[in-house]
Amino acid sequence: MYFFNHFGRFILMIKGMFTRPENHKMYWKELMHQCAELGIGSLGIVAIISVFIGAVSTVQTAYQLVSPVIPLATIAQIVRDTVILEFAPTLTCIVLAGVVGSKIASELGNMRVSEQIDALEIMGINTKAYLVMPKILACLIMIPLLVVIAMTLGIWGGRFAGEAANILSNEVFDRGLLLDFIPYNVTFALTKAYTFAFIISGIPAYYGYNVKGGALEIGQSSTSAVVTSCVAILLADYVLAALML
Amino acid sequence: MIEVQHIRKGFDGRVVIDDVSATLETGKCNLIIGSSGSGKTVLMKCIVGLFEPDAGDIIYDDQNFTAMNTKDKKAMRQQIGMLFQGSALFDSMTVEQNIMFPLDMFSNQTKGEKQKRVDEVLDRVHLTDAHKKFPAEISGGMKKRVGIARAIVLNPRYLFCDEPNSGLDPQTSLVIDKLIREITTDFNITTVVNTHDMNSVMEIGDKIIYMYQGLKEWEGTNKEIIFSKNEKLNSFIFASEFLQDAKDMRMLEMKGKISDDRDMNEMLK
């Protein structure tokens, strides 16, 4: 019952976003601001994680593939597929759920508690449309881009680690990358990225928008938003894999 | 003029305000007073539409606000300005951007015109050197004045102030009260103030509504309140011995028994 109560309210919040903007220019400005805040602001952490994940994948795959009958290019194939299918979309989005999710929940929570949302309502502004929608749209635009960057940097990190640790040369790695490449895997990864982007932005926005109380409650809602988003990402990851692969 | 007709509002089965009716007059400071938890903030939030009343109507100059659709309500809200208890300024914007925000959202003015209007309202609230400061960099009294400036920037017909003096020293409170009074009379708007500050009541209370446990207990002016026989009202306004003494002195003064401060202690014995 608890779940359905929150789910119903979440749907109502999403429905409430779809009204005619009071001023298109201001909404566009807010969308661009959120794209910069949530997307470009997360670029650093995404880059660092991706490079290291790719590098670790290469080293660990090489450690497990000890048989002389398996060609070294297989390592590149495995790194490519794991990065594209799982590490870039899922792991990046789990990290972004913490970074972006807590930011959205605490920002909206603080605005609610300090009556800034009420002030906007009094002015005649649809706060769901003005505050929540640009955040969700910004995540839907920026997170798939971040996932593509994560894929590229992850594979590059694996390639770099292979050469640096003397596991396989760049030429062998590049050959392995092109071997049996399935473009559908990228489509699948991007489908996951869009789904996770909605989860990362929508769930924290719901928690932040509906905060009641003070500083303690803002902290609690921020934590709950991140935990719920992570669980929802893992659940969606399994459902999408079961449906699409 | 705003007419509040038989408003009732409850939360989780508990009635917070019950059958409250009042007329809030144009060109006057209408004060809603009462102790904490008496329902005055809920009443104000019902009037401005932040809470949907369970029963009753709010009439803004013959227009039934409670019966309006969302589009009409949005249009009506552009005629409402509100100063919140904590000022509710947008943290990420400077003072100037805070005040310009309603203009950016709802007017088609040029940047120069908007800037001129911002300068005008900042001048009106006696803040001429705070344009580029952020809310975190200004004092509580200045925040309230910025809140008032933002509330009046679109020339509203109705101004609502929720506890405008909370957290301010008595001197700054007087400045804010004076400002609210000036804006009300200069622009001939309907002003509604929620307060439990007795100085404000005596300074600007053209019309006073006293709320007690969710009911309208008393209604009158600042001239009448001091002589009211209502026990609940008296126990609220004369909660301190000092104020009770002040009332006694006022009574004696009016009866001509004392002429100046030097006689007061003598007469009170």
Image (tube, coloured by chain):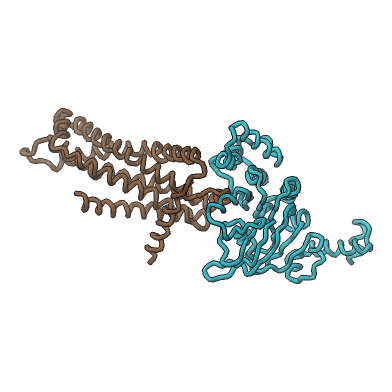
Chain colours: A brown, B cyan
Count of labels shown? 0
Residue at x-position 45% and y-position 48%:
A132
The image shows residue B245, relative to residue B102, as above or below, that is below
Q: Is residue A64 left or right of residue B229?
A: left
Residue in view at x 23 percent, y 31 percent: A160
Provide residue B30's location: percent of width, then percent of height.
72, 57
Q: Position of residue A55 (x, y in %)?
A: 24, 37
**Quarter of the image where one finds residue A3:** bottom left
* Residue A126 visible (yes or no): yes
Q: Residue furthest top?
A: A171
- Name the foreground residue: A149 vs A35: A35
Expressed as whole percent of the image width and height from the top left, the position of residue A168 reads: 15, 32
> In the figure, B24 relative to B148: above or below?
below
**Image-based side of A131 in relation to A168, left or right:** right
Relative to A219, is B108 above or below?
above
Q: Quadrant of the N terminus of chain A?
A: bottom left
Viewer-side residue, B119 vs A219: B119
Residue drawn at (26%, 34%) of the image: A152
* Residue A235 location (% of width, % of height): 28, 55
Q: Judge by depth and name the residue closer to the eye, A170 or B11.
A: B11
Query: Extreme front residue here?
Result: B62
Q: Residue furthest left?
A: A69
Q: Is residue A24 left or right of residue B230?
A: left
Name the quadrant containing residue B197.
bottom right
Q: Residue at x 40, y 46 (%)?
A: A136
Res. B172 in view: no
